[in-house]
Amino acid sequence: MVRNDENNSNMTLKVTIGMPTYNRANGFLVPALECALAQDWENLEIIVSDNCSDDATGDVVNSYDDPRLRYFRQKENIGANNNFNFCVEKAQGTYFLMFHDDDVIDPDLVSSCMEAAGGNPGYGVIRTGTRLIDGDGNLIRDIPNRAAGLDYNAFFRGWMNGHFTSYVCSTLFNTQMLKDIGGFQSHHGLYQDLIAIARLIARGGRADFEPSKASFRRHDKNYGNAADLRARCEDAVELAEVIASEAPEDRGALYQESMQYMCWTVYRHARRSSMSKRERLQAYRMIDAEFQHAYPVTRYLYDRIVKSRYKATKTAVRRALKR
């Protein structure tokens, strides 16, 4: 049902859904478009930026006769991140949702975010919870957004401790603030969404809606070779630097914690890669150096192998005693 109360100033706020796409005409494009068009928020525009697909993307989008839908086709492939930012550049809404064409959003995602904002056009970001789904749409995990009331530092510490997560499909960005910082930017386009979130929370704060209103689709993938991991290191260090630089206080401690956490995430990518044991050990050493030994590889291996085995053994003993 459309939330159509004339006394609700929320309804004056326009929201843009930006959908960058490439060769998904026979995949998730149609359900993604239908998710966007099914939003119960009236003041909405949907921008589809086709990154020079060679399939029937244009025919699929143009088959929808809806004045809210704006379709652009790039003359050449401009790269994924440039395509993201093209959507930002064209956005006319007060808030902006980057909706990748393989994710899923509930019909009331936008209206729930606007309810959380309470008609305020000045928040940096507005967030809901997120579901993780597999390639077939099966639920992997539901992660509510339990960040309400946390200040900047507590928010990022909560995120690093796994108390909640952050995905673009469940985040509305303040459009003008996003444009002011240059859109989604990082060295290699790997953590650009989180960098934008840090900068915008620092500038405008955030509003939080606890229930999950979007689903992020996880695909099977190779976690990369040494070159890919080096790029991931560089972007992860950049994110840690931005998180700390935007903090209102306690920057030194937050920087160290961010460096340790991001180093851990890249170690984890290396562990999941298809590299040989020797290549993986070399990758670990490279990661350790890139993060300036914030989380030394020896400590990581100890934590992962020794501590995890001790914990598993302790749990097994406790269960055996209960029997």
Image (tube, grey):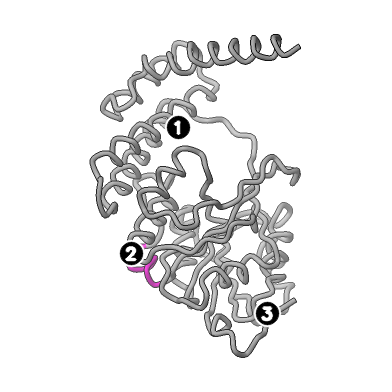
The numbered disc on residue 203 is: 2
Element type at marker 3?
loop
**Prevailing SS of the magenta stretch:** helix
Q: Nearer the viewer, mark 3 or mark 1?
A: 3
Q: Residue 106, how many percent across, how many down? A: 69, 62
Quadrant of the image occupied by residue 29:
bottom right
Q: Residue 93 versus residue 314: which sits nearer the camera?
A: 314
What residue is at 50 percent from the left and 57 percent from the top? 148
Q: Position of residue 322 (x, y in %)?
A: 72, 14
Does 57 lie within the magenta span?
Answer: no
- Counting from the top left corner in percent of width and height, residue 301 is at 43, 15
Q: CA distance from mark 1 to mark 2?
A: 27 Å
Q: Residues within 10 Å of mark 2 (few under 14, many from 20)?
A: some
Which amino acid is tagged 2? Answer: Arg
Give the class, few, some or many, for how many residues have Cα within 10 Å of label 3's Cα (few <14, many ≥20).
Answer: some
Residue 4 position, x and y percent, is 67, 84
Q: Magenta span covers which residues?
A: 176-182
Residue tagged 1? 265
Quadrant for the N terminus in the image: bottom right
Determine the secondary structure under disc 2. helix
Residue sitting at x 62%, y 68%: 112
Determine the residue located farthest toward the bottom in the rendered image. Answer: 6
Q: Label 3, on which residue? A: 3
